[in-house]
Amino acid sequence: MSDTSAPGIPAPEGPTTLIDTDYEVGQDNVSMSVGPFGLDIHNPVFAISGLTIVAFVFLTLAFQESAGAAFGDLRDWLTGTFDWFFLTAANIFVLLCLFLIVSPYGKVRIGGKEATPDYSYSGWFAMLFAAGMGIGLMFYGVSEPISHFSASVAEGAGSAESWAPLGGAAGNAADSRDLGMAATIFHWGLHPWAIYAIVALALALFSYNKGLPLTMRSVFYPIFGERVWGWTGHIIDILAVFATLFGLATSLGFGAEQAMAGLNHIFGIEVTDFSKVMLIVGITGIALLSVVAGLDAGVKRLSEINMVLAALLLVFVLLVGPTVAIFTGFFHNLYEYARYLPELSNPFGRTDDNFRQGWTAFYWAWWISWSPFVGMFIARVSRGRTVREFLTCVLIIPSLVSVFWMTTFGGTAIDQLVNDGYQIVVDAPLELKLFAMLEALPLQQITSFIAIVLVIVFFVTSSDSGSLVIDTITAGGKIDAPVPQRVFWACFEGLVAIALLLGGGLAALQAMAVSTGFPFTIVLLLACFAILKGLHSEPR
């Protein structure tokens, strides 16, 4: 066995089983200068990923009308045909995590038997919290609970046209509230975090314990051996780039829709395709400044600002909203989530097609497409933890934060409707529901403005962090590649978001998240087997 690890990766501490390979990080890279800019790129991965995405942006913008229809059809076909596949895969990820927590493999320490954590519990939890917060919570914090509640309580709940989860509870407000919140937590609880945990554990194990580069291809060394450094590995990394880029573009597109709706709501700025494009261009420009500033001066500071603003908004709604109902609802919603979990996660024999395909299958594909991005972030901050400690905290801490956020915002919106007859939130489009809920509370101009700032800063930090992850993959695992490469990917994240919004709006965004999530689901299922093989060879 080799006694060294990949450059930039700390060597394992204590007895471990490094993988013996002659591969060196960056050995297939092409180094060149374009004017004053230096490049250091992994030849086939960067070239194929970059050219394919350039072609995609060009064709989508050139054929907007036909592209919109094609994206809608693609989304419906994938979620309608393979919903069982997405649900089954997500269940496997959850079950594997739970198995590893209680099995002897849980004693394996990431980074070697004598490794110590790089961060304190408080710092580690804060970073897990930051990873769990994003544009998705801002966009769906109000819109999803109120949508599930409205569909469940409606007269037509349970019909073929209904979007109610599990057939709803027509006419029963209490049961509909329970079902709506349980369905929301299902989409933001254990399942998505199990997806992230699988990727994070795989990357951490094969980098910090086995000494391989911090890139997706390394995970599959136990399956494919030295072939991971050839075309087998190139394909895996290319799929990871596509999944990450389109997953990010989906989030950025949602963020642009919501920020634009909020600006229209507060300042009366007209919502047009041009205004959405200019918003994305402006925010991408800010993201580029953050990229150039570096992680500590850019993303770290912006993330700290966002966490403070998110906490202030959360506490404000908690205090001026139905405070007692939110606190009691948090525990009640967790109970209802556990009660409905077997039915909600069942892939077969269900009749709630719209909910299962339009909500759950889309969500699982979206989380899977995001998984290289979030997984790599979690892997980089989790060295020194045991597998049991790692999985327990990654599954539970961010899930509880998400549940409390959804209970606060979604529960307030449902309370406004049920107890005050406030119908505006229900009638508002998805991207405007948050602002409609805030409108019924004091200081709505200030809180709505804070919400817009939150969405924009989430946009910036996601773009910056995402470009770092994609650049690491397309630089052959190098974590110190030239800054212009990250600038390139940050620009293209914005361009892809623009192309998708113009070529079909939210339907196009969802279609690309699903279409890139589908092949990457197969990659993650193989990764489950690789994790078990990798853990089996580790000292416990």
Image (spheres, rainbow, N blue to C red):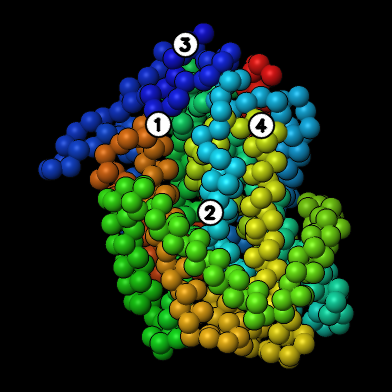
* For residue 291, side relative to residue 5 (left or right): left
**Of pointers 4 and 2, the one earlier in the residue sequence:** 2
**Mark number displayed over residue 38:** none
Query: What's the residue type where badge 1 is placed?
Result: Gly
Element under disc 3: loop
The image quadrant that residue 181 belongs to is bottom right
**Of pointers 4 and 1, the one earlier in the residue sequence:** 4
Viewer-nearest of discs 4 and 1: 4
**Mark number displayed over residue 477:** 1
Query: What's the residue type where badge 2 is placed?
Result: Ala
- Residue highlighted by disc 3: 3
Viewer-nearest of discs 1 and 2: 2
**Of pointers 4 and 3, the one earlier in the residue sequence:** 3
The image quadrant that residue 340 belongs to is bottom right
* For residue 377, side relative to residue 148 (left or right): left
Element under disc 4: helix
Q: Is residue 321 visible?
A: yes
Distance, label 3 to label 1, CA atoms, is 19 Å
Residue drawn at 29 percent across, 62 percent down: 285
- Is the residue under label 2 in contact with that under label 1 (CB below 8 Å)? no
Residue drawn at 60 percent across, 86 percent down: 441
Instruction: Name the residue nearer the viewer: 306 or 213.
Output: 306
Mark 4, Cα crowd under 10 Å, few <14 / some 14-19 / many 20+, is many
- Residue highlighted by disc 2: 130
Query: What's the residue type where badge 3 is placed?
Result: Asp
Residue 387 screen position, x and y as percent? 66, 31
Residue that sits furthest to the top in the current view? 1
